Image (cartoon, coloured by chain):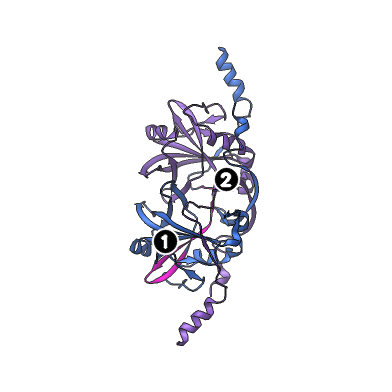
Chain colours: A blue, B purple
């Protein structure tokens, strides 16, 4: 073998090859928990939501994937608005309750203090540290879910959750969901700076 | 005022109304960090990715939002495959390095032990506890990002990260990213069971 190939094999050996097993197709390890707000039949409704992500930088767009069976779907489609509310650890039971019950047979309009922002049909939860109001800009229909893409119109946060005028995630103390073990988790500790920690590996 | 309205006001007062401030439109608090793998020009390339979510239950689909400037885009479009690799806390520097460097001018094909699964063009990272290989099924073009929707074809995990045959997130010990403060965080503690913790609020 020539030099470069040998070098390459040696570099590859710096870690032992680990032995992975197949786990099928249903695993996605962890997501931040949120509560989606929508106005349905003139009333605020709330559902627990774990499937969401920012999807575009500019304009700021967020994608939420909602199972087609959910009561909130009709309200999002009718009003073309929804909200994303980030609950704090102390709201775990209320968050879970929003996932255990459906607006089809449970009125969830009174369980939180509801407020509205610029969009008049995106109910937000005053008890949540951080609330995001979104205008629906696109709906991508999937086999079992609707992927709603919303433009972030405004974000509302309690000043007590800010440090140096930006959201302090340790104060917000969010909840994470793991599946398929179905557990809720807290945030741990700060371990490094993004776009910085890897600089020492640059040659 | 009549009875129901008074009742409603009283119920609303069970929490004090908090005073929220507006934070603009760029805030989304926290996401799990991953490394996206793609084969570009015949070589494995890796980028740090914080914008991803499951988007459909059945078939299992995952959405990843990649800025159009990224080198990986061409490979994902050409091969119609990509991988999502979940790094553990100890891989923070390597994960950050993948975000600090571009495949345009940095060969990242040698920084990890790379393996392939059923899809022959979705390079996966052996050092990551959990790797997901995805087949591109849809591309939603956004103004600044491409939202790639992939079907999960297989998930690969190290047995050392399992407990009772399911992934143990505490063993995986993932990394989270917060913006705009740009910090990395660890997972905290288990605080409850999903689809259960809220049962006591049901009447």
What is the span of residues highlighted in magenta in the rendered image?
A27-46
Residue drawn at 51 percent across, 26 percent down: B107
Q: Position of residue B149 (x, y in %)?
A: 40, 44
Spot occupied by residue A7 in the image (x, y as percentages of width and height): 59, 18
- Disc 1: CA contacts within 10 A as few (<14), some (14-19) or many (>=20): many
Chain that bears disc 1: A
Point 47% across, 63% down: residue: A47
Q: Residues within 10 Å of mark 2 (few under 14, many from 20)?
A: some
Q: What residue lies at 62% left-to-right and 25% top-to-bottom?
A: A13
Name the residue beneath numbered marker 1. A82
Mark 1 to mark 2: distance in Å? 27 Å
Q: Secondary structure at mark 1?
A: strand
Apparent side of residue B193 relative to residue B56 in the rendered image (left or right):
right
State yes or no: residue A28 in magenta: yes
x, y (%) of residue A183? Answer: 58, 56
Q: Chain of mark 2?
A: B
């Amino acid at each position: 073998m020539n030099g470069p190939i040998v070098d390459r094999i040696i570099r590859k050996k710096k870690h032992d090859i680990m032995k992975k097993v197949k786990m099928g197709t249903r695993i996605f390890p962890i997501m931040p928990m949120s509560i989606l707000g929508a106005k349905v039949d003139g009333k605020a409704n709330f559902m627990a939501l774990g499937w969401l992500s920012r999807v575009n930088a500019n304009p700021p767009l967020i994608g939420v994937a909602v199972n087609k069976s959910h009561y909130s779907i009709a309200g999002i489609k009718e009003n073309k608005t929804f909200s994303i509310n980030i609950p704090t650890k102390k709201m775990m039971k209320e968050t879970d309750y929003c996932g255990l019950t459906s607006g089809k047979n449970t009125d969830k309009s009174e369980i939180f203090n509801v407020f509205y922002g610029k969009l008049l049909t995106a109910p937000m939860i005053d008890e949540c540290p951080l609330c995001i109001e979104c205008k629906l800009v696109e709906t991508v229909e999937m086999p079992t879910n609707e992927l709603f893409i919303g433009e972030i119109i405004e974000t509302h946060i309690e000043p007590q959750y800010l440090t140096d005028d930006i959201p302090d995630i340790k104060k917000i103390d969010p909840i994470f969901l793991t599946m398929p073990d179905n557990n809720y988790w807290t945030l741990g500790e700060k371990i490094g700076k993004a776009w910085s920690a890897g600089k020492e590996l640059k040659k």
